[in-house]
Image (cartoon, grey):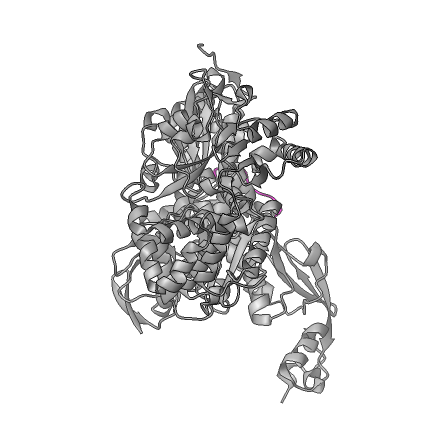
Amino acid sequence: MAKLKSVEELEALRKKIVSQRDPKKTCITICSGTGCHAHGSEKVAAAFREEIARRDLASEVDFRVTGCHGFCEQGPLVVIKPDNVFYPGVKTRDVPAIIVNARDKNIIQRLLFTDQKTGEKITYEHDVPFYKKQKRLVFGNNGLIDPAVIEDYIAVGGYAALARALFGMKPDAVIEEVTRAGLRGRGGGGFPTGVKWSTTRNAPGEPKYLICNADEGDPGAYMDRSLVEGNPHSVLEGMIIGAYAMGSHEGFVYVRNEYPLAVKNMQTAIEAAEKRGLLGKNILGSGFDFSVRINRGGGAFICGESTALMASLEGQVGEPRAKYVHTAVEGLWGKPTNLNNVETWANVPLIINNGADWYSQIGTRNSKGTKIFSLVGKIKNTGLVEVPMGITLREIIYEIGGGIPGGKKFKAVQTGGPSGGVIPESHLDLTVDFDELTKVGSMMGSGGMIVMDEDTCMVDMAKYFVSFLEGESCGKCLPCREGLQRMREILDRITEGEGRNSDIRFLEELSATLMETSLCALGSTAPNPVLSTIRYFRKEYEAHIRDKKCPAGVCKKLKRAAAVK
Amino acid sequence: MVTLTINGRKITAEEGTSVRAAAADNNIHILGLCDEEAVAPYGACRLCLVEITTARGRKRLVTSCLYPVEEGLEVVTENEKIRQHRRVLIELLLGRCPDSEKIQKIARGLGVNKPRFPLHEGNNKCILCALCTRVCREVVGVSAISLTNRGVERMMSTPFGEDYSEACIGCGSCAYVCPTDAIHMIDRGGKRLIQWPHSEMTHKLVKCKVCGMYWATEKEIAHMIKISGEKPEHFETCPACRD
């Protein structure tokens, strides 16, 4: 296989691939994302392959295993292309019927999705309420791509942005475009990406390094996993464009070790891109070199923090350092280093392909583009959703998420993982964007969205997050190491009926010191779940402390409060 | 050279100097437990907090040991906010090392007497400032001890926690630099005992050929021969008896 040595060769290859694929030919796609895997999609996929072969129908029916489609609650998901007929919850025994009917362009009514509200059957994927309000710009291609097949990515326009940047734009122009687009970091910090790129580009020193942060440690978050597993090339393409813009020739993808499939699929993508001359030396014959290596984490949440990640990459213990000098100036091995989250990188090809003007039309004034959220917890439609910034929480939870199961009452939604806070019903009409979420005491974070109902104890929930962080604290700085343990001790006492009247004040005092004196963001944001639950659910704390009661009936050592049903 | 203001006083400092070092050069003492001139700043104890306002007007609390001086920086080393945070920090430290006289003294000075939470046991005055391990690595260059484990389990340790560290030369620099007396060096009967918080190691001492006093461990001498390039004979006498 010869490497592509020009834009013309890339476009010729793209044309060839597309021409070899009949757009009208039936293609059965099955999702192999996290949720669908848990639902047994591997067996169903095997059944499809066997049955198509057994019936010798390969010439009439294509079959493709794709990345995550997002509607994890309803897996295994099967979508029949080109019409996008949607079959949720497919079982191996449904396979023969699906194949035959797909070939004949028939629809199997009994397998269709039923809208619980109206009772009607929905045929097409885009009509399913879960998908209707989403804007799947970054995630949408997952359904069209087998992550192990680079030709699939090229067929949907992959690497066209890279070609445009490399041959049609100067590095500064690329940074200008990303800056004008208003892209902000999707890993939690929300820092303007263009500014970070500019700082890295202008920082003195060689070599410059690029890092993709795929450590994704927030409990309940699996967006980055699904992007790396389902569309690794989109992330790579973004990195190569960034490397060109900043003058970097060496990049790393730091993946948490608990994501072996993400490691595998990214490795496959790297090798495939290198073989095609889209990565490595003399990319597309442009003379620009950029290579990427994968590094795996060792099981520490703190290694999602940029300086701890870099320490880990250097082979040292994953501990953060003060960021008074930015890593864009002095990072990996003391050199200028640009670190971005998986989702941030995946947004870059979109911006280069469609332009900053197009991108900045989506979203709100200070939060442009879309965000992928993992909608989990007490919600009917668990899964990964991609929505434009500016959509309301109510729309996400009720129209996309389908509301709370079991007839239970919504209580709060936790955003931003252990660094974020809870948002109660009174703020459900809040428009989701970086600044709005921060205003109410939470934060965007990496995109975790945990829905809670009347059976969730907010004190217990705060204790959960503090315990998590207590175990993940690196232990270097005093306030985080000792402070989190002491906060957890207080929450233990409160949830076990030994709360004292001074406890809320004490938690607030410790929180203030952690927030202002911790060395890194693990410690400084750790008080958020505690402070926000005190802010919105103070009465629950008081019931635990004064009345020794747990209104939600969760804290076992306390009597269940008499619930008026 | 850079001009900045500390507590209203204009001072100048070389670029690359930390605010804490620049303050010390001007006789302004900022509290701190884990910052020593001989090693790179670390940022563990957080006691050296100051409130800064940058030339651009950005105000925040930073650890002065790590923050480099900037043109036009305004630094305040004492105010109610800093005092309050220091009180909580020392209270946390006292909870960890209730037996440390040094911590008790600092706490009393800040108005903190008894921590409001259960006291830890078994930390043996070690405040995890890491000065011992940093000196061993950056100054002595042997990295015989290290910090292990994560979070509250963190501790100063020898390899595998054994009463032996192959790289340790028994120089006692760790004992010398420890701010809370958590490491002891005891010379007795021709042997040197180094007692760390959770393990210990005994070294053989060597006598001076001239005065007969025990003056260094065998491994110290071997190390000094290696790094100095001097002949072994040079170290058969103690420094006092050497010409």
Report if residue A281 lies within the magenta region: no
Please check the rendered image and state whether residue B122 is part of the magenta-colored stretch, yes or no: yes
From this view, report whether residue B210 is shown above or below residue B91. below
Q: Residue A195 vs residue A496: left or right? A: left
Camera-nearest residue between B191 and A478: A478
From the viewer's perspective, is residue A388 above or below residue A320? Answer: above
A204 or A532: nearer the viewer? A204
Image quadrant where one finds the C terminus of chain A: top left
Across and down, in percent, residue A230 comes to: 53, 44
In the depicted view, which residue is nearer to us: A98 or A333?
A98
Q: Quadrant location of the N terminus of chain A?
A: bottom right
Q: Identify the residue at image location x=56%, y=42%.
A: A471
Residue in the image at 70% along x and 77% along y: B222
Q: Main secondary structure of the magenta part?
A: loop
Picture layout, residue A165 above or below residue B224 = above
Quadrant of res B239: bottom right
The location of residue A483, given as percent across then percent down, is 48, 43
Q: Return the residue nearer the eye: A15 or A535.
A: A15
Task: Kindly tell me whether residue A249 is visible in this rendering.
Answer: no
Q: Position of residue B224 (x, y in %)?
A: 65, 78
Figure check: A115 above or below B72: above
Residue B67: x and y, percent? 38, 61
| Magenta range | B116-123
Q: Residue furthest bottom?
A: B243
Q: Residue at x 29, y 41 (%)?
A: A364
Q: Residue at x 44, y 61 (%)?
A: A8
Report whether residue A187 is seen. Answer: yes
